[in-house]
Image (tube, helix red, strand yellow):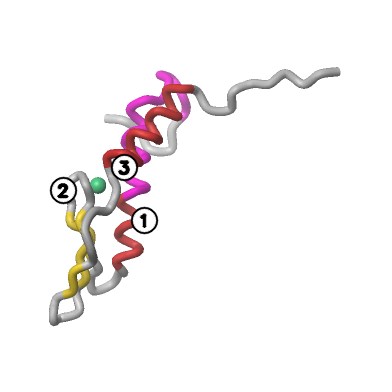
Amino acid sequence: MTERLTEPVSAALRDAKARARSTHYTVGTVRTDPDGTVYLPCSCGTVLRNGPTWTLDEHVRLHRAEAKYLELSAAAPPGIPRLIGLP
Ligand SMILES: [Zn+2]
């Protein structure tokens, strides 16, 4: 018996993930202020940085996750059950 090979992720969603990766990548080098604030620009224009209660790495991870969410959400099939409701 052969197992049917199905595509686990549709092309539209795969493209959405790729779009998020290709439009949100860090550029340049980390800049550090005398007060200890570290900055790293994203290719979308957002300046990623640390803050009083978060690290630069945490901001980078959140930013990438948000970018991926926005792209996937826009490309998701209509009617798919969602964790976050659309307006
Ligand atoms: Zn970005």
Q: Residue at x 40, y 28 (%)?
A: 15
What residue is drawn where x is 27% and y is 30%? Answer: 87
Q: Is mark 2 within 8 Å of ligand 1?
A: yes
Question: Is ligand 1 closer than 8 angstroms to the Cβ of mark 3?
Answer: yes
Residue 50's x, y, as percent? 25, 68
Q: Quadrant of residue 54?
A: bottom left
Q: What amino acid type is highlighted by mark number 3?
A: Ala
Quarter of the image where one finds residue 35: bottom left
- Give percent across and percent down for residue 45: 16, 48
Where residue 31 appears, as percent x and y from the top left, is 18, 69
Which marked residue is nearer to the observer: mark 2 or mark 1? 2
C-alpha span from label 2 to label 1? 16 Å
- Tell me the element at label 2: loop
Mostly what secondary structure, the magenta segment?
Answer: helix
- Image: magenta residue range: 64-81
**Which amino acid type is marked by label 2?**
Gly
**Residue 64 placement, left or right of 46:** right
Q: Secondary structure at mark 1?
A: helix
Q: Which residue is mark 1?
A: 61
Disc 1 residue: CB within 8 Å of ligand 1: no
Q: Judge left or right: residue 65 versus residue 40.
A: right
Residue 67: mark in rendering: 3
Q: How far, Cα to Cα, is label 2 from label 3?
A: 13 Å
Residue sitting farthest toward the left: 34
Residue pictured at 43% horizontal, 27% vertical: 13
Q: Secondary structure at mark 3?
A: helix
Residue marked by disc 2: 45
Which residue is at a point 72% across and 18% down the rendered structure image?
Answer: 4
Give the side of residue 8 with respect to residue 56, left or right. Answer: right
Residue 74 shown in magenta: yes
- Spatial CA span between label 3 and label 1: 10 Å
- Residue situated furthest right in the rendering: 1
